[in-house]
Amino acid sequence: PSSSAPVNAEQSSMQAASSRTKKKKFPITGGAGADTRSALQKFIEGPFDKISGLAISFHVVFVFLALQHDGHAQGVEMGYIVDPDYTRLHHELEVVKHLFNAYFLVELAVRMVVCRCRFFYTPENGVENFNLFDAFLVISTSVDLYILEPATNAGMISLDVMRPFRFLRLMRTI
């Protein structure tokens, strides 16, 4: 008899068990199994967190620059500064503001899809306060940009005071 053919039922069951363990060793990762989910979670906790940390850092710098520009514009409107070109960056700053908000909306959506309920609550840590804070910031900024700002045109109602709190997200990332 050849060495690869089973001699008895015991050997046959051992070979079947061996082939089952081999299948478990090399799972298919393209489907909706646990391996795909853990790979997504590893991506979220690794490179995605670093990219988001950089985006938050750039956003903090952007907020400072935008506030500086807004202060300059107020000085021109009040007559303290003479600068006929003070509005030259207004459109670009608005575009960048919307790009940052779009990124943060996508980031929040990706994290919520990948983590599901664990985004807000884990048995180990309880309520995830930073994630609740992130969601609040992103939602409040979106409400400000896309509902309140167009509705008021005069800028009387604004949630701009919330934007500097994104710096706290940077501290959490570090």
Image: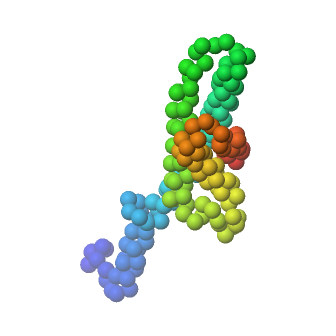
Residue 144 shows up from this direction: yes
Above or below residue 140? Residue 125 is: below
The N terminus sits in image quarter = bottom left
Residue 105: horizontal and vertical position, in percent? 53, 48
Q: Position of residue 36 (x, y in %)?
A: 45, 60
Residue at the image position 56 percent from the left and 26 percent from the top: 90
Q: Is residue 116 left or right of residue 174?
A: left
The x, y position of residue 43, in whole percent, is: 52, 51
User: Residue at the location (55% across, 55% down)?
Assistant: 111
Q: Percent from the top left, x then y, of residue 143?
A: 58, 48
In depth, the one of 99 and 24 nearer the eye is: 99
Q: Is residue 24 above or below residue 82?
A: below
Pick the residue in front: 52 or 40: 52
Q: Residue at x 27, y 75 (%)?
A: 2
Q: Is residue 20 left or right of residue 127?
A: left
Q: Quadrant of the C terminus?
A: top right
- Residue shown at 54%/58% (left/top)? 112
- On screen, residue 148 versus residue 164, left or right, reads left
Instruction: Name the image quarter holding residue 162.
Output: top right
